[in-house]
Image (cartoon, rainbow, N blue to C red):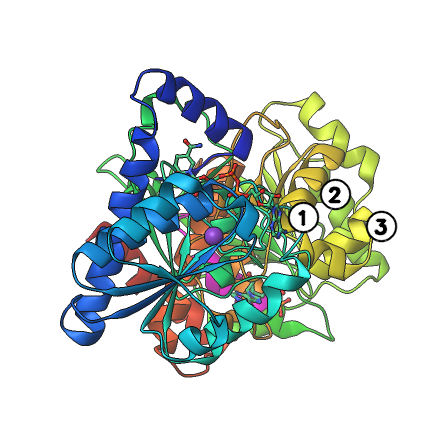
């Protein structure tokens, strides 16, 4: 599991650890890891560190100090290191002394040295930065990007919000970020994540002092493999779980087919389809159990998926209410999100412990549920998903460039999905995801696990299917077994 901690948690941990170490030791650990990472990148790019041209962008805090000490280490290995001091009167004095002592220098003209650099270290701001780059730093950050140099961010790309992943103005766009002690939420959540490039974590001994519950966690292969259901000798199709899919309409019959396609690959023993798309579903998937009446009359299921392509006719409205009245886990997606009655939804968890709910909005649907503009959801995804989960008393999976899953219990870390590709932004891929997640719910996974495992497999399947080319939703469904094998294999 990859975990991220808030700035407050990092600051507390740093204080405790610093009390036990000689003055400045922690910054030396950070700088040593940073210099080693930069040396590795320089060796990859140009064969050796000796003779490389390195430029340090140095702000007024300890982030700049890290850059200066790392620059001193690179200078001692023969790199030509030049510091651009953004606030000359407030530069980290120890770091500057170390750089000058190692043969580094201060730039006369930042733009000249940036144009010729092989590597730029961004030490403008780290966890102390607020509110985007200040105007004087903007032209320098742009110049760093416009040459051929690799840009390496120290701890965080300057200008991004560490705790939320928001980018309130201009921010550095790094090729790589070397972060210290733990990941910060902003490194894992868009739009900030996109500025960070490849992530590298340097251990500075903070681990024992960080809270055991992080702010954010990202599943990795081993975590997903542990959570995936595996049938045993005792299993039969009913014991493996039956997922009911209420999706599709005369206008959108394809949504029914795609949701069923996802559900068939999610580990449930059977898929029961209910809705107006019976013919289309059976033509494609003859193994589906079908029913044309109301969901509650269709036979037993261990979970429901309701909403993809359902439209908003009277049958759809009644079907959503019917499903929400059940005591099994329910996933509500797409049109279902518009049709759900909020009081009924909130009442579910009070009625039965098994009556859990997973909502899977994209940014537009989340915006409607919160009554705010879509852009606000996209800019502040982490806040939005937490607020939705709290307000609706349900687990919420917010789809998009970084899919997030939040539980209504604010003490539980938000899951951030590390797989996926922008090629997933294609019609119908969300229908596949809802079927898949619903199927995992039917096998007994709790909503947060079902949602995050589904997002992981879905994103991985899309990557495997795409390999750099466009994919259709149907391809994503077809590649789910390969993604599953990739995880467990
Ligand atoms: N505390 C520690 O022991 C350690 C801290 N480390 C480094 O220290 C960093 C935190 O240092 P600081 O707390 O000094 O904070 P930062 O260096 O992140 O930034 C604070 C400074 O930046 C200025 N600033 C804030 N927002 C700005 C903006 N938008 N544009 C330009 N300037 C802005 C502030 O006025 C302040 O002077 C970490 O990110 C990490 O890089 C590491 O050396 C590890 C150890
Ligand atoms: N920019 C993006 N990068 C990665 N994944 C994305 C991006 N945009 C959308 N997705 C993913 O694509 C899927 C689209 O789902 P959705 O918006 O419900 O589409 P539809 O309703 O057409 O099925 C979701 O899994 C979402 O997370
Ligand atoms: K930085």
Name the quadrant containing residue 107. Answer: bottom left
- Residues tagged 2 and 3 counted as in contact (Cβ below 8 A): no
Could you tell me which secondary element the residue under label 2 belongs to? helix
How many residues crowd around disc 2 within 10 Å: few (fewer than 14), some, or many (20 or more)?
some
How many residues crowd around disc 1 within 10 Å: few (fewer than 14), some, or many (20 or more)?
many
Does residue 100 belong to the magenta stretch?
no
Most distant residue in the bottom direction: 469
Q: Give the number of the disc on residue 164.
A: none
Look at the image and tell me whether residue 281 can be seen. no
Task: Write down the residue under mark 3.
Answer: 371
Mark 2 to mark 1 CA distance (whole Å) = 7 Å
Residue 52 in percent (x, y) is at 24, 70
Q: Is residue 170 left or right of residue 451?
A: right
- Residues tagged 3 and 1 counted as in contact (Cβ below 8 A): no
Task: Give the magenta range.
Answer: 256-268
Q: Residue at x 41, y 69 (%)?
A: 462
- Placement of 324 over or under 265, stated as above or below: above
Task: Write down the residue under mark 1.
Answer: 295
Task: Write down the residue under mark 2.
Answer: 322
Residue 286 in percent (x, y) is at 45, 68
């Amino acid at each position: 599991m990859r975990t991220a901690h808030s700035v407050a948690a990092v600051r507390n941990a740093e204080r405790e650890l610093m009390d036990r170490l000689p003055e400045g030791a922690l910054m030396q650990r950070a700088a040593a890891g940073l210099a080693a990472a930069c040396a590795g990148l320089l060796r990859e790019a140009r064969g050796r560190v000796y003779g490389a041209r390195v430029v340090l962008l140095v702000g007024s805090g300890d982030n700049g100090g890290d850059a200066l000490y790392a620059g001193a280490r690179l200078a001692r290995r023969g790199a030509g290191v030049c510091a651009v001091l953004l606030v000359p009167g407030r530069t980290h004095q120890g770091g500057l002394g170390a750089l000058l002592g190692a043969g580094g220098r201060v730039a006369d003209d930042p733009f000249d040295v940036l144009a010729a650099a092989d590597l730029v270290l961004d030490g403008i701001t780290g966890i102390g930065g607020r509110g985007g780059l200040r105007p004087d730093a903007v032209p320098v950050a742009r110049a760093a990007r416009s040459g051929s140099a690799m840009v390496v961010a120290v701890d965080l790309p300057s200008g991004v919000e560490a705790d939320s992943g928001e980018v309130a103005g201009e921010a550095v766009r790094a090729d790589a970020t070397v972060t210290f002690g733990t990941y910060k939420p902003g490194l894992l959540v868009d739009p900030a994540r996109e500025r960070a490039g490849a992530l590298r974590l340097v251990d500075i001994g903070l681990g024992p002092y960080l809270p055991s519950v992080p702010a954010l966690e990202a599943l990795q292969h081993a975590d997903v493999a542990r959570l995936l259901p595996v049938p045993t000798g005792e299993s039969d199709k009913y014991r493996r779980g039956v997922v009911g899919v209420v999706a599709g309409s005369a206008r959108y019959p394809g949504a029914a087919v795609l949701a069923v396609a996802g559900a068939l690959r999610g580990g449930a023993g059977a898929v029961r389809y209910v809705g107006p798309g019976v013919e289309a579903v059976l033509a494609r998937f003859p193994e589906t159990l079908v029913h044309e009446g109301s969901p509650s009359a269709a036979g037993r299921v261990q979970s429901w998926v309701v909403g993809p392509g359902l439209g908003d006719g009277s049958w759809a409205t009644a079907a959503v209410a019917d499903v929400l009245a059940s005591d099994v886990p329910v996933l509500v997606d797409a049109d279902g999100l518009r049709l759900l009655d909020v009081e009924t939804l909130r009442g579910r968890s009070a009625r039965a412990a098994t009556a859990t709910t997973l909502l899977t909005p994209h940014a537009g649907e989340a915006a409607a549920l919160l009554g705010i503009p879509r852009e606000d959801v996209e800019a502040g995804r982490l806040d939005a998903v937490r607020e939705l989960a709290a307000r609706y008393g349900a687990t919420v999976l917010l789809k998009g460039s970084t899919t997030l899953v939040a539980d209504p219990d604010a003490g539980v870390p938000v899951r951030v999905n590390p797989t996926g590709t922008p090629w997933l932004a294609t019609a119908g891929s969300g229908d596949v995801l809802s079927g898949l997640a619903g199927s995992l719910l039917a096998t007994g996974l709790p909503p947060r696990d079902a949602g995050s495992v589904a997002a992981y497999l879905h994103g991985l399947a899309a990557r495997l299917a795409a390999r750099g080319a466009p994919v259709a939703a149907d391809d994503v469904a077809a590649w789910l077994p390969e993604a599953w094998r990739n995880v467990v294999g």
